Image (spheres, grey):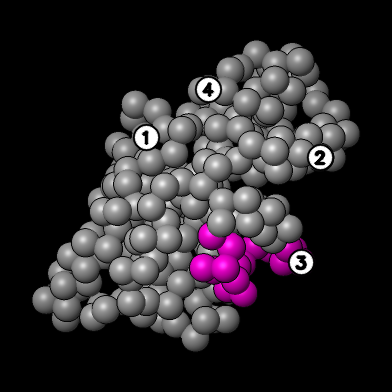
Amino acid sequence: MAGFDLIIFDCDGVLVDSEIIAAQVEAKLLTEAGYPIDAAGVAERFAGMSWKDMLLTVEKEADVPLQASLLDSTEKLLDEKLARSVKGIPGVAQAVARLDLARCICSNSSSRRIKSMLMRAGTYELFTPHIFSAKDQPDMPTKPAPDIFHHAVKSMGADPARTIVLEDSVHGVEGALAAGMRVVGFTGASHTFPSHADRLTEAGAETVINRHVDLPAVVEAMANWSAHDL
């Protein structure tokens, strides 16, 4: 496809409908720890943020001391719930089949969790072995840092300027832009909220879609626009 060589997908909230499950678990634990919040509030306030960074933010902003044990206990609880109930977001395989581009995943989740979720969704084989996890890289900061995107394009032998990214969070959009890539926002998962698309656009996404079926046409339009700009 003229204009782009590589497309990068986020995983949570883009390929699998996992963000709402994480929000439910995290809201319950934060409320029990003295920071009352519901799943919708977690999705809107902390979308795309790692659980560790979320806890640090809550401690700093609300002056609520949180136990370090929450880190490990939450990861275990969330892994168990995701393994039982996460679903793939419809249309991924069909969209990928229509995109004549190299593809990979860049995620803040661990590669172990990504594999488990994609296996359940039936899309793991579409992306393996090109799955890049910030959490699995020693000392690598998670999104919104651009590091995982830099790592991915280097590994894939791609040019950041010829790479397009599909992201559902402001943190993801900011990280991809900082890496010199172009971004499409995605609001097709269950954790979406009324101002979701506006926030992604304000963060720098060139357009926002809520169905994977629309992705190939959007990528083609953006590629043509790039070509005319050269």
Name the front one of labels 2 and 4. Answer: 2
Report whether residue 155 is seen. yes
Picture disc at residue 76: 2
Question: From the viewer's perspective, is the residue at label 2 or at label 1 nearer?
Answer: 2
Q: Identify which amino acid the numbered label 2 is placed on.
A: Lys
Is 18 or 93 nearer to us in this picture? 93
Q: Where residue 211 appears, x then y in whole percent? A: 32, 46
Highlighted magenta segment, given as a residue range: 123-143
Identify the secondary structure beneath mark 3: loop
Mark 1: amino acid: His
Q: How many marks?
A: 4
Q: Could you say which disc has been placed on residue 41 in the image?
A: 4
Q: Dot 1, crowdedness within 10 Å: few (<14), some or many (≥20)?
A: many
Residue type at numbered disc 4:
Gly
User: Counting other residues with Cα less than 10 Å from the Cα at mark 2, is it few (<14), some (14-19), or many (20 or more)?
Assistant: few
What is the spatial separation of the Cα atoms under label 2 and label 4, in whole angstroms?
A: 22 Å
